[in-house]
Image: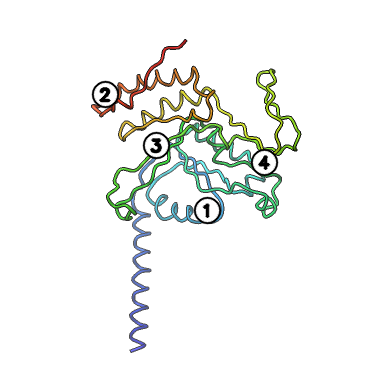
Amino acid sequence: MQRSARLVLWNARQIRASTRALATAAAAKREKIKVANPVVDLDGDEMTRIIWDEIKKKLILPYLDLDIKYFDLGLPHRDETNDEVTHAAAEAIKKYSVGIKCATITPDEARVKEFKLKKMWLSPNGTIRNILGGTVFREPIICKNIPRLVPGWVKPIVIGRHAFGDQYRATDIVVAKGSTLQLVVKDVPKTSHDVPGDSEDVPKTSHDVPGDSEDVPKTSLNVGFRCSSGDSLLDKEPSREEIKLAKRMASILKDFEARQLEVDEDEQLEVVEEQ
């Protein structure tokens, strides 16, 4: 009986091995789909490198004829190139329009010691976003064969925010009690409070707002759309750029009307004339 069980197990293994061999042979003979444009491949750190390599070998390369522009964004290579590889990868994405990025390590003090890094390099995500600009959209990937926590929730929420600046562009410092913190703008000094502790200045440019005003409505043509801005904390932020944003978004609303999409009157932007 024991020998019979071993024989069945051996046969099952042989069948699986034969099936894999046949599948590999079939994939080799199958004509690959030619992809017209290059794709930028941004490799990552630790397990993501292994998982992404397996995905490419099993699910992508056997079926697609790809021109891959490869960049190693693993932490050791970023340190070796003084993070120039991250900038080169971002420029490649700008050139070819499509990039696939694995998860990467943003080093803290412990990682600097662990990898013996030259310095505490910035977040690759932040560097890439600052170079690309525009808007970052976060959208869940829905697969029919993967159950969701809320089965009836069929329309995912997509979050869009401008790519430039914020905490990813910030430089944090610690100032001693009694120090004077100064913010200098166009050679005109502005002196703040005498404070102990930390300071945070959030950089933004006037290019962020027009970019968002085009990217968000165009992306939302096929989904519901709500726009919000946080002016309760930064009351200096609403400005001439917000007026321009309102005008541009109001003009883009015509695309909604042309496609007979519902526009909530309460949500329409009020266009304010410039003073």
Q: Which is more N-terminal, label 3 or label 4?
A: 3
114 to the left or right of 213:
right
Please name the amino acid that badge 2 sits on: Glu
Q: Which of marks 2 and 1 is nearer the N terminus?
A: 1
Quadrant for the N terminus in the image: bottom left
Q: What residue type is labelled 3?
A: Ala
Q: Mark 1, residues whose alpha carbon is within 10 Å: few (<14), some, or many (≥20)? A: some
Q: Mark 3 points at which residue?
A: 36
Whole-percent x and y of residue 200?
62, 34
Neighbours of disc 2 within 10 Å: few (<14), some (14-19), many (20+): few
Hey, what amino acid is under mark 4? Asn
Outermost residue on the left side: it is 260
> In the structure shown, which secondary structural element does the residue marked by tag 1 occupy?
helix
Q: Which of marks 4 and 2 is in front?
A: 2
For marks 3 and 1 on the same chain, the one whose residue lies earlier in the sequence = 3
Residue, disc 2? 257
Q: Residue 87 sits in which quadrant?
A: top right
Asked if the residue at tag 1 contacts the one at tag 2, i.e. Cβ–Cβ closer than 8 Å, the answer is: no
Q: Could you tell me which secondary element the residue under label 2 belongs to?
A: helix
**Residue located beneath label 1 in the image:** 49
Q: Which residue is drawn at 36% across and 28% down?
A: 218
x and y percentages locating residue 237 in the rendered image: 52, 24
Is mark 4 in CB contact (under 8 Å) with mark 3? no
Q: Position of residue 112 (x, y in %)?
A: 68, 50
Residue 82 is tagged as 4
